Amino acid sequence: MFQIEHLPHAPELFFGLSAGYDRRDLKRAYGKAIRQYSPEDYPREFQLIREAYERLERELRDNRDQARSDEADQAWIPGNHPVEKNDTASGRPSSVDTGATSSDHSRRPDFSPSLQHLALADPAGTYRRLTEQATRSPQEYYVAAVLSDVIGDGRSAEYFNQILAGLSRHPSDAGLLALAKEYLRHEVDDADVVPVLERVVSNLRTPLFFPLTETLWTRLINTAPFEQWSELLKRCESEVRQVDPTQRSAFYVRLMKVAVWKAPIDWSHGQLEQLESHSVTLDEFSQFELEYLGHLHDLLRKHPDRDRLPPVKQKLLEAYKLHCQSDDPQSMRALIEHLARLSRDAAGFQKAFPVGTDHDDNSWVIATQLMINQVSGQSLPNASNDTDEMLSAVGKLLRDLAPTNQAVLEGQDKANSRFRTLPLVVWMVLGCVLGTPIIILPIALVVDPVGAILTMAMIVFLFVGLFISYFRWLYPKHLQKRQEHYAWRWLMHGYQRHWRRRLFRYSQSNNLRIGEMFRFLIEATEGTKWQPLGETLQYFGSQDAGLIIFVSIRSVTS
């Protein structure tokens, strides 16, 4: 649970971030936090969380270019290094020998302070002596990597080889892991991605392979044929020993955000099914992303020919794709700009998402809202809403819609008449016409008062039986679902004809989320003569996929 009292003075403590966290860690923590403090229910707390997120993100961005030099500075500081045992086979200590005794090594850093002077005076010799040692500390692997760059003019891959060798001996060292990730993210050319992946898996056959190479896989899928990419992934994965299901599942969730746009539908379906079977091992944020992927896959499966979709839906798919591939401020700004352009096309949303049809737009709605939940913390602050102006807009909306209230709701009466009242009349008339002669004829042969009474009783019994059979059998089994279906369709057609365009215009008078907008509408009409109309508007708005998506996008761009 996130404790809001830690903000704004201790954002790292609030997000539960450990030392050495990266942007992905921050993004995951932010996603969890805004699910606990949603903007609809906790606007003040949400604003504090967003400001804290933006502050930490700026700090990460400012410090990213200095990460490697900071590591280099720490590598030379005596006293910061763990003790390394002597090589019992050769009798040589793990660091450069300066004549210290074994008891000195138990109290001193794992390499002598004179190593700095040796490296400056004789880089090639120091590099050779370090690489000949049987055991080295993580910092010594890093020093050797830096020296390999010095003597190789920065053009050799030996820098990464030394980091990789260090990780194979010290897989839990956060510093080496950060350096390796930084190198793979920024220093590997597109032409070298495949050889580097093969080199990593041949030297590092542990679950560490998954988070370390994630950026390379997402780059490769955009440049290589999918069959080649998937075959290489399968081969590399088969060489990883002691696979951790949790780490592998988290890796595939992040990988699928890029792969789902290029992979065949069957491949994506198989991977998502496998992830669903292991979803219990995922953290909350990964489960959130898995749900998002499921809806994206559903949309891509239903619409294989995307060029035939309405323009707004094509642009929405492009927004989802930009969101999946946004991992830096520049790409996130591109997404926000794309959404801003999309939010100006209210007519396009009404055309792309018609109401009162059998089309299931649920995946569009959920995918958009899941995307907006993540984007909302990284967009520019929205302009504040003036309460008096919003009340004025609500009043004008209700006055505009009140005259057509009966015309909108007549679909309900029409459905009741066609599928309930009229069939009941027909059922009773036909039943009486067909049943009465059968009952009366035998009894009519008995000419006495008892026969007359019996005839009347049988007619009443027939009438009551027809009535009960209609409501207990015919109507619920054959007519009720059709009545509800057509009532909904005719109501939505009335809404589209009389109210929809006006409600879209009202939504542009504020920048509230869809839930906030209707909550304000209900609160503004509560206890007044407008309350039934407000509740009716809330019902229609909750059924309008185009309005929900349009308002959700406007909430982060207006």
Image: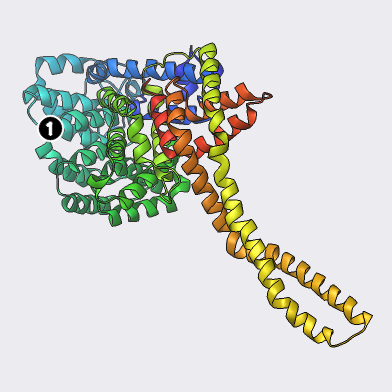
Work out whether 346 lies above or below 396: below
Residue 283 shown left or right of residue 307 in the figure: right
In the depicted structure, whether residue 277 falls above or below residue 388? below
* Residue 119 or residue 543, whichever sits in front: 543
> How far across and down, in percent of the image, does residue 513 sit?
47, 27
The residue that appears at 47% across and 43% down in the rendered structure is 493
Whether residue 88 can be seen here: no
- Please give left or right for residue 332 compared with residue 158 in the image: right
The location of residue 5, given as percent across then percent down, is 56, 16
Residue occupying the point 60% across, 31% down:
533
Residue placed most toward the observer, 512 or 488: 488
Residue wearing tag 1: 158
Residue at screen point 69% across, 72% down: 431
Where in the figure is residue 336, as x and y percent of width and height?
31, 25
Q: Amino acid at mark 1?
A: Glu
Q: How is the image coloured?
A: rainbow
> Residue 153 vs residue 199: left or right?
left
The quarter in which the C terminus is drawn is: top left
Q: Is residue 449 left or right of residue 456?
A: right
Indicate the quadrant containing the N terminus: top left, top right, bottom left or bottom right.
top right
The image quarter containing residue 53 is top left
Q: Residue furthest right?
A: 449
Residue 384 visible, this angle:
yes
Image coordinates for residue 416, horizontal then vertical, percent: 61, 52
Check disc 1: other Cα within 10 Å, few if <14, some if 14-19, many if 20+: some
* Residue under the point 35% across and 19% down: 57
Q: Secondary structure at mark 1?
A: helix
